[in-house]
Amino acid sequence: MQKYLVLAFLSLLFFVSSGCGVRWQTKDTYIFVYEIEPNSPEGYVLPVALAQVSVSGNISAVRYTDASGKAHFQLPPGTYTISITKSGYLPLVDTITIYTLELTPGRYVYYLARQGG
């Protein structure tokens, strides 16, 4: 009987350590930063390049937006504070939650306002 218990325990240990069990996975998370074009009655948006996007929570990371206003993070499940700053714009802070077992990438869109405008 002990032999079967040991074999069952070793099988379970192998199953879990081989990655077949439930694991916390990171999620592709995209932060898009735009501004509404000044004096535009249609509300055109322009990407904000080189805005600093800081993420703090289970992990902390800093990225800068590319020419299309996008910053990419790989975040494990949890709640995060997002801070977006760029010279000439008002800073923006938000909180997001990444949930377990989400299969689609996270997309979060933010609009910065120019200082003094």
Image: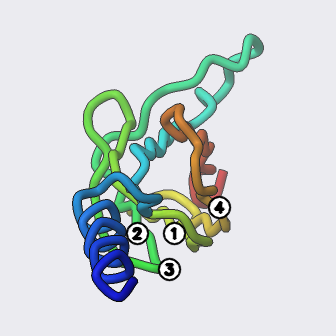
Mark whose residue sits in front, 3 or 2: 3
Residue 57's disc number: 3
Q: Secondary structure at mark 1?
A: strand
Specify whether 22 is left or right of 112: left
Position of residue 65 measured from the top left corner of the image (x, y, whole percent): 32, 45
Position of residue 110 measured from the top left corner of the image (x, y, whole percent): 61, 45
Q: Amino acid at mark 4?
A: Ile
Q: Secondary structure at mark 2?
A: strand
Q: Please report whichever mark, 1 or 4, sits nearer to the chain's N-terminal start.
A: 1
> Residue at point 39% right, 83% down?
1
Position of residue 14 measured from the top left corner of the image (x, y, whole percent): 24, 66
Report the residue marked by disc 4: 96
Residue placed farthest to the front in the image?
1
Q: Please report whichever mark, 3 or 4, sits nearer to the chain's N-terminal start.
A: 3
Report the residue marked by disc 2: 54
Which image quadrant for residue 111? top right
